[in-house]
Structure formats: C-alpha cells, structure tokens
Amino acid sequence: MKAELFSIVDNPIIVDDVIQQVQSVNAGAITVFIGTVRELTNGKRTLYLEYQAYESMAVKKLAEIGEEIKSKWPGTIAAITHRVGRLEISDVAVVIAVSSPHRKEAYEANEYAIERIKEMVPIWKKEYWEDGTKWIGDQLQKVSYE
Amino acid sequence: MKAELFSIVDNPIIVDDVIQQVQSVNAGAITVFIGTVRELTNGKRTLYLEYQAYESMAVKKLAEIGEEIKSKWPGTIAAITHRVGRLEISDVAVVIAVSSPHRKEAYEANEYAIERIKEMVPIWKKEYWEDGTKWIGDQLQKVSYE
Amino acid sequence: MIKILFFAGLQEEIDSDSLMMESAEATVQEVKRYVQSIYPNVDLQQVIAAVNEEFSNGDDIVKSGDIIAFLPPVSGG
Amino acid sequence: MIKILFFAGLQEEIDSDSLMMESAEATVQEVKRYVQSIYPNVDLQQVIAAVNEEFSNGDDIVKSGDIIAFLPPVSGG
C-alpha cells in the first residue's frame, strides 16, 4: 500500500510515512521540512486554522515540483504531503521529504520545494483569531492575471 | 521521560522522538536531517558500518553546537541524536531536528549543525567492504595538532 | 457549458463553490466579466484563473467542458 | 597518573583503548612522545589531542587526574 509521493490529505500527516516514501539504498541524506501551526504571528494569537485546496490542481502542481527537483538535482527523490481542513496549534500542515546520496542537494531541493509550493500550489489557509478570521494563501501568486 | 536534546545512542534512532523534542507552540517550521547508511560510495559497495564515538566528549560537543545555534538563530530549538555501533544499509546514523517560528532559520541552523558535527564531534565510522575495511571520520579535523 | 470554480475567500463571498456559464467558447476575461456581472460586488481584480488546472492569461480560450478556477488573492506565506 | 584514551583506527593499531602515564604533569607533546616511545610503529603525526574533552594544543599542560584523548586522523565526511 504505497501512498502517492505527492498528495493532499484531510487527516493527520504521519511524518514517518512521508520519510519512508523517499528512502533508498542510495540515500545518504534525507531532509524533512515540517510546516506546523504556530500559535503567535506578529504577536497575534491564532486559535486554529482551516486549509482549503483546489485539490486536483494542487496534487498536479506538487508533482510538477517533484519533476523540477528531479531534473535540477539528479538522484534526489522528493515526496510532499499537504493537509487540508481544520488544524489546531502544533498540527502538521505540510511535510516535504527529500532523499539524496549527499546532503547538500537534499537541503537545497527541500528548501526549493517549500518556496515553489508557496508560489504555485493552490492552497489557502483561513486564520481564526479571537477577534476575527482571514483567508491567507500559501501562494505568492507571482502569476498575474490580465 | 524526556530524552536529552543531545545524545549518543547505541540502538535504532526513532526519528519522531527527535522531532518531538523540538516541538513548540511557537514553531512554524521544523527541519530534520537524517543521515543514513548509503550502499554505494564512489561506486564501491558498503556491506555495513561501525560507528565509534568518544561519547562523553561527543555529547558535550553536540550540546555546544546547540548553544551556538541558539545564539546565532534566537528562537530556534535544536536536538541531535547520533547512533554508534554496527549499522546496516539504510539505517539512521544521525538525526538533527531544528524548530523555528520561520522556515529560513530552521533550514540554515540545521545545515549549520551537520557541518559543525563533521568539524568538531569525535565520531568515527569504519566502512566494511567486501575487500576490506577503513576508518573514516565524521570530523574534518580542522584543529591541527602541534 | 463552462464550469467555474471558486475558492477560499472568493468562495465565501459568493457563497458558492461553482457556477455554470452557458457558452461554447469564451476568453478567460469574458468568463471573468460574466462572473462580475452576476456578482457585481465581488472584487476580482487580484484573482488568478486556472483553466483545466493550469495557470492562464486573460486571452486564453475556455471551451465548453473546460473547468476554469478563480483563485483568490492571498496575503503572503 | 594521566589517563590516555585511543579511538578508532588508533585504538585498533595499539590494540588497546587506554594507557596510564605515571606523571604529575606533562605537556600534550610530552604525552605524545611517551605514547610514541611505547608504540614506535604507530603514526601519531595527524593525531589531535583532547584534554578533558576539549581540543588542545601541544603546549597545553596535562595534570595527574586529567584525561587526554588521542583522536586519530580521518579521511573526510
């Protein structure tokens, strides 16, 4: 029951499952990025978050990031899982795992992945504070419309 | 039963245990480095490895790296576990976890940690190949003697 | 029929996650004007459109059977 | 008494993980010469010494009760 390397899920992410997906006898280094829900942002207290994705497109874009990584850093394997739905403080929103024969590539490719996720993957989060709510995107939306 | 943030162990490392140690409601990002035993190095097949540490000094040096990280990247928390003894292919030799409110610091501090480990922590590995063995250090041994 | 999808804040403002447009073919900009005509108070200035899950430009053509998604503006990572 | 520790390849060459030196005080270099006199065939050129778990220089003083560790050369990461 091998899970997809790039997926959007609505239940808690098991970090180790994502790590397992990139394991290889050729791997000397695995880097993992875990994006968690932080309580304070600029001094403002978050109660909880809600993530929403344009799921089919998000999965496709995650896989594209995986292809980009494979061609930029040959020999690396990447896996990304992003969670949607309601998340509490300290819950894991996204896990990126990259394995590589050598560590430098594993760090570079991992950081590249999170930057690209924020640029091109249609996932938004809604912050719930005591005094209100706001939709905030993971995307930087560099693509301009019109 | 909170484990030490910086430790040398002789049994398998549970990656998730190391991650747990750096979790915090202030963390928005956790980076993890997992050093694994790779089968091929420059085309040569490794059968297994043996790690040896000057344990008391190694733990002290790992803790020093943690202090360096805390002062260079305020707000980050680091934990490092290194395994010693016999390790098979794909076994986890070292896990570094760093949490931070923001991701950039978490990546930087994590990569800094592995570089420093290789510079100043007295841990050596013995490669076992089909045709021989060799001691290889994690240290770069920049400190010169005499 | 062109299927139009809305997400996040835009979905909440419009109070619906989709809308059908009776058209055999239209540019992305024409679809946008159509949505604006139905929901005049919604701000679509910053919206990005994706046609069949690919980012698109205003001049791109949307055909019957295509899905166009309106991805609302975001305020950083 | 000064306790001397050996690790990795050096430990294997010497076939022991430690050695005692009967001395109240010595420099790191003197300890090194002592080890060399007992094990003339062992190459200590590249060896780094740590006194009480801190990296040290050849001029550093080792006292009775101290532990000096000889950390063998390594060939990369």
Image (cartoon, coloured by chain):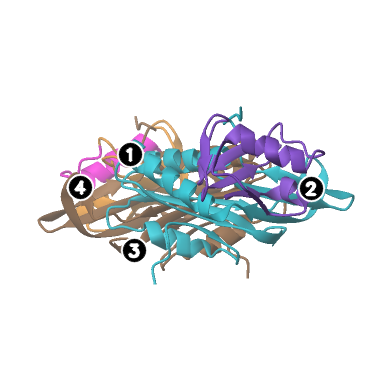
Chain colours: A cyan, B brown, C purple, D orange
According to the picture, the residue beneath numbered tag 2 turns out to be C13
Q: Chain of mark 2?
A: C
Query: Considering depth in this image, is B123 or A80 the residue closer to the camera?
Result: A80
Q: Position of residue C41 (x, y in %)?
A: 82, 39
For image coordinates 22% across by 58% down, the residue present is D15
Question: Residues at marks 1 and 4, common chain?
Answer: no
Q: Where, by quadrant of the figure, is residue B103 drawn? A: top right
Q: CA distance from mark 2 to mark 4?
A: 83 Å
Amino acid type shown at disc 1: Ser
Q: Chain of mark 1?
A: A
Badge 1 density bin: few <14, some 14–19, many ≥20, Cα 10 Å? few
Q: Position of residue D2 (x, y in %)?
A: 41, 50
Secondary element under disc 4, as helix, strand or loop, is: loop
Q: Does the residue at mark 2 contact the one at mark 3 (Cβ under 8 Å)? A: no
The residue indicated by pointer 1 is A71
Instruction: Look at label 4 and name its amino acid.
Output: Tyr
**Residue for point 64% across, 56% down:** B23
Do the numbered discs 1 and 4 sit on residues whose CB atoms are within 8 Å? no
Query: Does the CB distance between marks 3 and 4 fall below 8 Å?
Result: no
Q: Chain of mark 3?
A: B
Mark 2 touches mark 4? (CB < 8 Å): no
Of residue B54 and residue A29, the one placed in the foreground of this image is A29
